[in-house]
Amino acid sequence: MKNRGGILLLFAALLLLSLYYLARTWKINDIRKDAEAYATINGVVDPAKKQYYLDSLWKQKVFLGSTVESLTKQELGLGLDLQGGMHVILEVSPADIIKSLAKGSRDPRVTQAINKTRDLAAKGSINFVDQFEKELKALAPDIKLATIFSNSSNRDELSLNSSDSQVKNYIQTQIDGAFDRAYKVIQTRVDKFGVSNANLSKIPGTNRIQVELPGVDNPERVRKLLSGSAKLEFCEVYTLQEISPNFERFTSLLMKIDAENKKGSSTAAAATTDTTTNSLASALQAKSDSSALDSTANANSLMNMFIVTPQGLAIKTKDTSRLNSIMKRPDAMGIFPADMTFLYDVNPIEGTSTTEDLVNIYPIKNFGNAPLGGEVITEARQDYDPMTGKPNVSMQMNTVGARKWKELTAKNTGRSIAIILDNYVYSAPNVNGEIPNGSSSITGSFSIEQAQDLANVLKAGKLPAPTTIVEEAVVGASVGSQALNAGVISSLVGLVAVLIFVVMYYSSAGWIANLALIVNLILLLGIMASFGATMTLPGIAGMVLSVGMSVDANVLIYERVKEELAAGKNFATAIALGFKNAMPSIIDSQLTSVITGVILFIFGTGLVKGFATTLLIGIGTSLFCAIFVSRLIFDNLIKKGKTINFRTAWTEKLFGDTNIDFIKNRNRFYTVSGILIVAGIISIAVRGFSLGVDFKGGRTFEAKFEKNVNTDEIRDAVQNVFPGSAVEVKTYGGFDRVKITSAYKIDDTDIQTDETLKSELSKAIASVNGNKGEVVSTSKVGANIAQDTIWASVKAVIYAIILTFIYILIRFRNQAFGWGAVLALIHDVAIILGIFSIFHGWLPVSLDIDQAFIGAVLTLMGYSLNDTIVIYDRIREYMAEKSNQTQSIETVINNALNSTLSRTAVTGFATLIVLFVLLIFGGETIRGFIFCMFVGVIVGTYSSLFISAPFVVDALNRKAKKELAPTKA
């Protein structure tokens, strides 16, 4: 083995790094348990106290030089389905942006065109701006867009002479900018929410933002937080001199509280001051060290709370929750002026020590009743100071704003005016003098990025971009806990089952494969932890499945080694040739799985993307372990003179001399497949599919009852909650659980509607014929999201087929192989669709057609291709051998099929073992997904042997006949 030393060094480094990152994950989870124990009083966890504990340790080095802050950034976290939480997709409406841009126009045709475009967008993905122009031109063929959108506020970008193309580009730019601003606002709100492992991402090609908040248990608060409009305000700021007498009184109060705290225990003292739900330390995510938990009077003294800086007043971030709590005390409310409110800077002060983060605090005057709002902004952009060349922000206001701004700046010359968005101060520039024309320049120690961010904040006032929730899912903590237990059990049982099977089949060589599999699992988890990946239930399924499928690489090698040993080669030579000859099949088969994994990652969202991530990483680690780790072990044993057995007593003669005539009977198999496909088509036409909520839109509520339920009784009980709308009720994960689905008011984006429906449903199922029930999780998918999901899924399958054909065509340089593989894929998908149509409602498994189903279909397509390409590689090898040149195509391909039969059977059986375990123990969330995979592996194996390879025979024969046919004169 070449470069043995380098490979050994790489392996050791990867293994140690993986163990290190897994240890980091263990450590942060241990700290969270300590925080929960600290915050538990009488069996109830106080979330604010738990967060306070974590805040206090945030900058402290707790594990091999790493702080709690750094540990949380590189840990293997748990997804929503494993710990509960909330998943939300928000949409920035282009229609609202266009309305705002065209607000000067009174032409009713503009409104009609916007409404028509919005209706079309709800049915599927379109380019909103192009479609708007098309609809407007249909109503007013001669109208120029510039006459609608050109005005004084955008005179630098548009004029009445601007072409329609220029106006469309301007509109699209404004929509994109509004989306970016909305994303920034949502990102800030999520950061302020204080949720560990929160995930925020833009969905490519859309105006949608996906938010995942693991562990949250207040959906109504999240809805209000995420969907509320951003409010921009300009407020006056008190000077420290103006409120210094008030601070003297406040200091006296702090001394009084300090004295009270000294009388009690340090724990009791902490409990009286840190349990506010408005902890800025949580909100800022700019935490401090563990000194907050120091029991000494000096560390906890409130007199050390405030710090005077050149910019004004600052506070340690760890003390913000205590200040918030104190300000709510009755004896503190009258100390400061009635119109004064303390607000914090949105960012911590840069350059502070790593153990004492500070944040500026501003005494704001008339907050909530600001003299000037953001609606007067007409333009804001990042610019450069002509004198210093440093970044600044230029701001322009409309006529009304300019007049008020003139008055405000004249009144506050030499003082600060705070720019406030969402209750946080983004900047508080000092006014140098009266600004008469509404054109201002904000200077400071800005970086270019900071100046751009401030300009975007100001634009949020110019062009509000309200967000609406178009999809959401709430998973209860109990549901997440059950899913986690199911995932862990299924993983362990599936792994043990595969390990036992491999040893039973390959004897002592199986132990080497098993060691490689265990190392593969460690590397997979370690790499995911280093990326800060989130483990979901489909991710666990992907992990276990990748372990099961990784057996394939070992099987390919072992079967080749057995062939070389049977041919009389010595052990060392057989090992070397086995690895060498198996390599093309291993690489080709795994690359096809990579293709489907990448497509899943690109087109999938949420849980499907989590599955794809795990699968892709698993493919890489599986290849490394099978090719290099196993080889290192074998080389070491060879040096020691050891001989390894590759057979057990019961596998000695298994598949040894198989001579099945696959090709002769191909027409029979074509007929069987044709019957199955036709039956599926008939069922699809007659019965259709059971579509998941993400494919048809609607609300779904999962409810749990004390005893087993009758779905008809539940339907009757809840029908009045959804008047005039069909209600679907079916058991889910047990006879005491049901899933209730309805499209009632699905286009209603009012967040209160969601709460009302959940409340009414909870009342309806509180007692059904004496059987008490409760809603444990909810989800909502808007109609337009459903249409986009369908289209994205169709594209994913089409792209997978096209890319597969291209890859095989390049790799095998023969269209017959490409079309054979494509035929097998279409065959597999058609049969799976037919089975899901025929058996939905009859089996105790959810057979919904949803995103998870598409993920399963794409995955089994990869598996089927894996099988097919291994056979193709052997066919190509046999066709190239001189000894086979005189044999017929039928004989060569039949021999190839028989020679790979043992590999096909062993890999298929190992994968089915894992899938069977997941099907039994994996939990309802992935049961439909796993059922699809289970059936798909059987169908995929069948098509590789009986459809794809025989088709190649027919295709090559037809080509040969055409070449031999006489040319017509």
Image (cartoon, grey):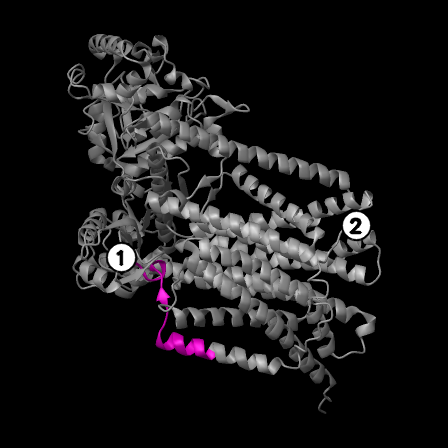
Q: Where is residue 691, by image quadrant?
A: bottom left
Q: Which badge, 2 or 1, comes first in the chain's sequence?
A: 1
Q: Which residues are magenta?
A: 678-698
Q: Magenta-highlighted stretch: main secondary structure?
A: helix
Identified by mark 1, the residue type is Ile
The residue positioned farthest toward the bottom in the image shown: 969
* Whether residue 143 is situated above or below residue 340 in the rendered picture: below
Q: Give the mark toward the camera: 2 or 1.
A: 2
Tell me: 727 left or right of 286.
Answer: left
Give the numbered dot on residue 612. none
Residue at 40%, 33% in the rendered image? 452
Say which residue label 2 marks.
643
The span from disc 2 to disc 1 (Cα, nearest Å) is 77 Å
788 part of magenta stretch: no
Q: Where is residue 666, by image quadrant?
A: bottom right
Assign a secondary structure to mark 1.
Answer: helix
Say which residue label 1 marks.
114
Label 2 neighbourhood size at 10 Å, few (<14), some (14-19), many (20+)?
Answer: few
681 part of magenta stretch: yes
